[in-house]
Amino acid sequence: GDEKKKQTFYAIHPHGAFCIGWSILFVSPEMSHVRFCFSPILFQSPFFRLFSRCAGNPGSAAKPDMIKYMKNGEDLALPPGGFEEATLTSPSVDRVYIKKRAGFIKLCLKYGIAVRPTYA
């Protein structure tokens, strides 16, 4: 049928210091339709932007940019724990820093986007 695929937000965990799972997903052909949102500070770097555009479909995680992507109907990916979660890295325990990171959930609810927790 003509069923429209539901817009999806991939909440990627763990963030980690090197984001290896995130990196593998970013260059994966199966995820080429997904806009991977990076810290606005990283995304301001011309070198980072150029490199990431060569490898995948990057975007800024700044709130106005996220809203624009959502309104455009794009699927998105983000490690929502950010820097704080990256610094909680432990080889023996997985930890999520989400307590003060609910903005993406509010936006997904507002725009009717499915949230898919993803362990990578």
Image (tube, rainbow, N blue to C red):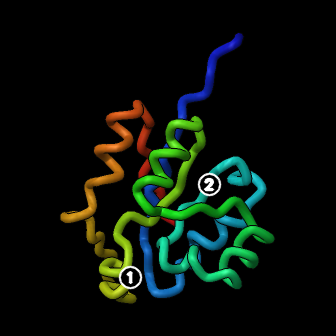
Looking at the picture, which amino acid does disc 1 mark?
Answer: Ala
Mark drawn on residue 97: none
- N-terminal of the pair, mark 2 or mark 1, is 2
Identify the residue position indicated by label 2 in the image: 35
- Can you give x and y, in whole percent of width and height, for residue 48 in the image? 66, 81
Residue 71 in the figure: left or right of residue 63: right
Task: Examine the image and state in which quarter residue 28 appears.
Answer: bottom right
Q: Secondary structure at mark 1?
A: helix
Residue 71: x and y in percent read 51, 36
Query: At label 2, which amino acid type do we have?
Result: Arg
Viewer-proximal residue, 66 or 34?
66
Q: Residue furthest top?
A: 1
Closer-to-camera residue (113/91)? 113
Whether pointer 2 and pointer 1 mark residues with C-beta atoms closer than 8 Å, the reply is no
Which sits in the foreground, 99 or 46?
46
In which quadrant of the rendered view does residue 113 lie? top left
Instruction: Please indicate whether residue 88 sits to the left or right of residue 59 in the image.
Output: left
What's the residue at 54%, 50% (across, down)?
76
Residue on which disc 1 sits: 86
Question: Is the residue 31 above or below the residue 2 in the image?
Answer: below
**Residue occupying the point 44% across, 37% down:** 114
For the residues labelled 2 and 1, the Cα–Cα distance comes to 21 Å
Mark 1 residue crowding within 10 angstroms, few (<14) / some (14–19) / many (20+): many
Q: Nearer the viewer, residue 108 or 43?
A: 43
Q: Residue at x 38, y 82 (%)?
A: 86
SS at mark 2?
strand
Examine the rendered structure and indicate whether residue 68 appears above or below residue 112.
below
Q: Position of residue 52 (x, y in %)?
A: 70, 73
Residue at 58 percent of width and 44 percent of height = 75
Q: Position of residue 98 (x, y in %)?
A: 26, 64
